Amino acid sequence: MTVFEGRFTDVGALRIAVVVARFNDLVTSRLLSGCLDCLSRHGIDTGEASGQLDVAWVPGSFEIPLVAQRLATSGRYQVVVTLGAVIRGDTPHFDVVVAEVSKGVASVARDTGVPVIFGVLTTDTLQQALERAGIKSNLGWSYGLQALEMGSLMAGLPR
């Protein structure tokens, strides 16, 4: 029996792209900080001249799948992380955006074979979003770990 598992070490060759929504940037910038902190502490070069990491900003969460797809199909990245925050309001807009971004991100991963980490918060209130982006814990860190694990796992799987 062979067991395949991702690791959080020996990430030297791993290239990661992060797609971040500007809308609700009070939340998304904190998610990005948590993600970058995790990646950096696990050996990913997150500096300005990094050859391992690129960050792409998009207007809102709805635009995330398109840019994630472009990055995933470029052949340059082994993992794409998506970060956004969709907060419920008084209209059905929330439901439309959440449905499309989640389906779109899943589709990118399936269509390209590149792991795409779904880091789009969907909350009822701004307070809930802020709690998940650093007041209580920062899920950005978890998304960074998921990226490392999936990048390592995919590299170890048979072709």
Image (spheres, helix red, strand yellow):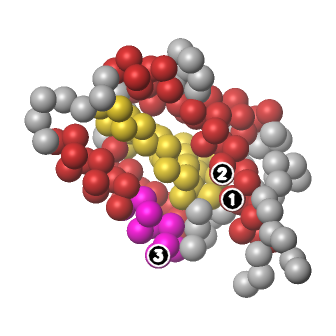
Residue 60 image point, x, y percent: 31, 40
Q: Which residue is mark 1?
A: 150
Q: Secondary structure at mark 2?
A: helix
Is residue 34 left or right of 4 when viewed as pictured?
Answer: left
| Res. 29 in view | no
Q: Which residue is mark 2?
A: 147
Residue 152, located in which quarter of the rendered image? bottom right
- How crowded pointer 1 is (Cα within 10 Å; few <14, some 14-19, many 20+) is rated as many
Residue 12 located left or right of residue 68: right
Mark identifier at residue 111: 3
Mark 1 → mark 2, Cα distance in angstroms: 5 Å
The residue sitting at the bottom extreme is 159
- Which is more N-terminal, label 1 or label 3? 3
Q: Which SS does the magenta portion mostly show?
A: helix
* Amino acid type indicated by mark 1: Met
Q: Are marks 1 and 2 in contact (CB under 8 Å)?
A: yes
Instruction: Tell me which residue sits at (66%, 62%) in the image.
Output: 78
